[in-house]
Amino acid sequence: MQALILFGPPGSGKGTQAARLVERYGWAHLATGDMFREALSRNDPVAVEAQDLMKAGRLVPDELVGRMVRAKLQQLKNEGRWDGIIFDGYPRNVAQVGHLDAILTECGIALAGVVALEVEDELLVKRLAGRCSCPTCGKTYNIHFDPPRTAGRCDTDGSTLVCRLDDNEQTIRERLRVYREQTRPVIEVYRGRGQLAVVPGSDGPQPVFERLTAIVDPWTGRHDR
Ligand code: AMP
Ligand code: ZN
C-alpha cells in the first residue's frame, strides 16, 4: 500500500487532479474537506461540531480530523481497496504531519511522496469565488473560466448549480490566511525529508496533470510515458 499527498492552497486544483490521478492509478481518494461536507449532509455529529469552523474558513481540530482519517482507512481496508491512496487536504498543519506519520506506520502504508501545486493568490481567489458544481452529476464549473451554457444550470442535466458556503470572498481570504500561516509550513517538513516535488498549477487541468504524472508515475512504478 502506497500513499501520495496532494498538497496546495485552496483552489490550487487538488480535487480536480486527485480525480484524474484516481482514474489513472485506481487508487482511493481521501479528501478530508469532502468527508466533512458529506458527513454534514448526513447530520453526522462529528461534522456538526466542525460546521462553524468550516463556515469561517478555519481548521477543524486535529483530533477530529485524525479520527475521521483513521475511520476512512479502516473502511478502505475492509473493502479491499488497499493498493494506494491519495491524501487531499491532509495534513493541513505541522501537528497533522506527525499524526499522519503515526497513522501510516500503524497501517503499514508507505509514503511515495508529496506533490505541492503552486498557484498565485490572485488566481486562487478567482477560481474559488467563481466555483460552482452540479448537485446531481457532480460536474464542476467556473463562472470565469468554464461557465455553463445557461447561467446557473448544469449543461448535462439542467440542475441548478450550487456553491460551497465557504466560497465567498470573505471566507476565501480567511482560508488563504490560514493556509499561509498554518498549512504552508508543512511543505518545509517534507522538503527537509527529501519527499517533496513542486508543480506549477496555474495552467489548465491537462498540462498540470501531465506534469504531475511525469513525477508520480515513477513513484508508483509506472513508466508508460
Ligand atoms: P477543503 O474542502 O479541503 O477546502 O476543506 C474545507 C474545510 O474543511 C476547511 O476549510 C476546514 O475547515 C476543514 N478541513 C478540511 N481538511 C482539514 C484538515 N486536514 N484539518 C483541519 N480542517 C480541515
Ligand atoms: Zn449535472
Image (spheres, rainbow, N blue to C red):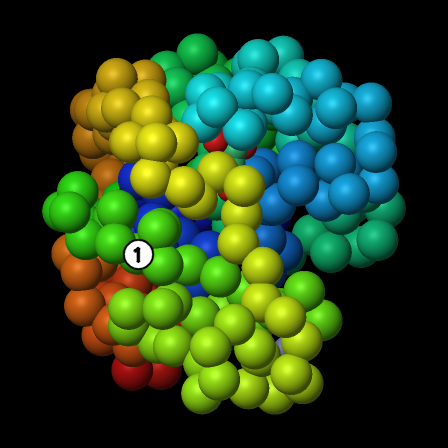
Tell me where residue 3 appears, x and y as whole percent. 50, 45
With respect to residue 195, does 55 lie above or below? Answer: above
Question: Which residue was labeled with disc 1?
Answer: 127
Is 19 or 175 nearer to us in this picture?
175
The reply to whether residue 55 is in sight is yes
| The quadrant where residue 186 appears | top left
With respect to residue 133, does 14 lie above or below? Answer: above
Tell me: 4 left or right of 76.
left
State the SS at label 1: helix
Tell me: 51 left or right of 96.
right
State which quarter of the image contains the C terminus: bottom left
* Count of numbered marks: 1
With respect to residue 106, does 146 lie above or below? Answer: below
The reply to whether residue 101 is in sight is no
Tell me where residue 207 appears, x and y as whole percent. 22, 74
> Which residue is drawn at the image coordinates 53% and 47% (left, top)?
164
Tell me: 212 left or right of 159.
left
- Tell me the quadrant of ligand 2: bottom right
Mark 1 CB in 8 Å range of ligand 1? no
Tell me where residue 217 appears, x and y as whole percent. 36, 66
Tell me where residue 155 appears, x and y as whole percent. 55, 86
> Which residue is drawn at the image coordinates 28% and 72% (left, top)?
145
Q: Residues within 10 Å of mark 1 (few under 14, many from 20)?
A: many
With respect to residue 93, does 128 lie above or below? Answer: below
Tag 1: amino acid: Arg
> Which residue is drawn at the image coordinates 35% and 82% (left, top)?
224
| The quadrant where residue 154 appears | bottom right
> Which residue is drawn at the image coordinates 29% and 63% (left, top)?
212
| The quadrant where residue 135 appears | bottom right
